[in-house]
Image: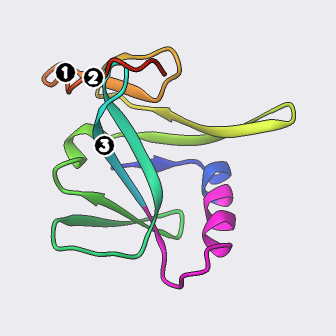
Amino acid sequence: MINISETAAGQLKTMLAEQETPNMFLRLGVTAGGCSGFSYAMGFDDDETDKDVYMDIEGMKIVVAKDDLRYLEGLEIDFEESGMTGGFTINNPNATATCGCGSSFRTALDAGKPSAEPC
């Protein structure tokens, strides 16, 4: 299961409401790359496939590709205000290593494909 805090859900719902295309949902995923081997992908989408898993979290439709779910099981997403800025934070219990910026990770069973580019 993926957990999204009430604060993060509020931010995401506001962002979803601002989308020009109706029926958008939040897609979470993983791509190869980043300092540690995998990078998180989080964005809005309206393209559904049979390779996806659908969830209802905090009243939002969340979609994850079946292949990515093993990396994201237990994921916690929060939103933190910091002075004049704020941003989403991710806590992944599957990550055995993360980069300094927190946007990439690797697991005990899969190192991914680290890129040469810094965060």
Residue at the bottom extreme of this rendering: 22
- The residue that disc 3 covers is 30
Measured as percent of width and height from the top left, residue 12 is found at: 61, 59
Residue at 38% from the left image edge and 49% from the top image edge: 2
Write the residue at 24% across / 64% down. Answer: 53
Disc 3 element: strand
**Which mark identifies residue 106?**
2
Q: Residue furthest right?
A: 84
Q: In the rendered structure, which amino acid carries the disc numbered 2?
A: Arg
Distance of label 2 from label 1 (alpha carbons): 5 Å
Residue 61 shown left or right of residue 5 in the figure:
left
Sequence-first disc among 1 and 3: 3
Magenta part of the chain: 10-26
Rendered image quadrant of residue 117: top left
Q: From what the image shows, is residue 34 above or below residue 44?
A: above
- Gap in Å between the C-alphas at discs 1 and 3? 13 Å
Residue drawn at the location 22% of the way across and 73% of the way down: 49
Q: Residue 111: which numbered mark, if any? A: 1
Looking at the image, is 16 positioned above or below residue 9?
Answer: below
> What amino acid type should be assigned to the residue bearing mark 1?
Ala
